[in-house]
Image (spheres, rainbow, N blue to C red):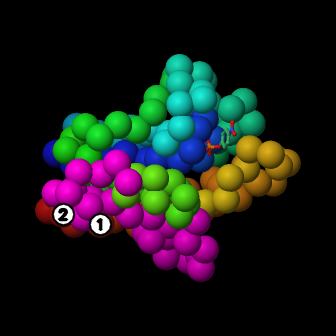
Amino acid sequence: MKRVLFVCLGNICRSPTAHGVFQHYVNQSGLSAQIEVDSAGTAAYHVGNHPDPRSVAAAKLRGCDLSSLRARQAVRADFARFDYVLAMDLSNLSHLQGICPDDYHGRLGLFLEFARDFSESEVPDPYYGGSEGFDHVLDLVEAASEGLLAEIQQELG
Ligand code: 4NP
């Protein structure tokens, strides 16, 4: 079993997009019994909320349903549970480093380290921008999801 947690600021735009897209890839690969996927925010502003309707609409156009997801805040216990704790940007990563117990820093990283065809290292926050920002999030998330799934498939043998 491998467990993956995606983390952004609010858990209503970027990390639910990663959650839904990566879950879709996992389902298609037939590994849903062996890979668990979740997402969380570093902030608590949106706890219990649905993903942003703009994220839901953009993901739907790529075949991913985000409508059942609800925001929660990342907690210290997540580091013991999840093999991969993947931040969307450096600010999220810095926050996670601040709450991560000593033994688990090796589980932390930037999600875009797994995106092969992009030079960006951070998924930009689309919240205050237009719909093109949400599409760009999907481009980045799809690329990183492919790379991450390939790595986990290797680990699972
Ligand atoms: P996310 O986007 O971190 O990708 O979920 C944001 C959502 C809400 C806010 C900021 C970013 N906000 O300030 O409320």
Q: Any mark on residue 155, and which?
A: 2
SS class of the residue under badge 1? helix
Residue with the mark numbered 1: 151
- Give the side of residue 55 with respect to residue 95, left or right: right
- Using the rendered image of the protein, determine whether residue 69 is visible from the camera's viewpoint: no
* Residue found at x 49% / y 76%: 116
In this rendering, is residue 24 above or below 67? below
Q: Position of residue 143 (x, y in %)?
A: 53, 64
- Give the side of residue 51 with respect to residue 108, left or right: right
Q: Which stretch appears magenta?
A: 98-122
Q: Quadrant of residue 114?
A: bottom left
* Image quadrant where one finds the C terminus: bottom left
Ligand 1 falls in which quarter?
top right
* Depth order, front residue of 12/42: 42
- Using the rendered image of the protein, determine whether residue 109 is visible from the camera's viewpoint: yes
Amino acid of disc 2: Glu
Q: Position of residue 120 (x, y in %)?
A: 60, 74
Amino acid of disc 1: Glu
Q: Quadrant of residue 141?
A: bottom right
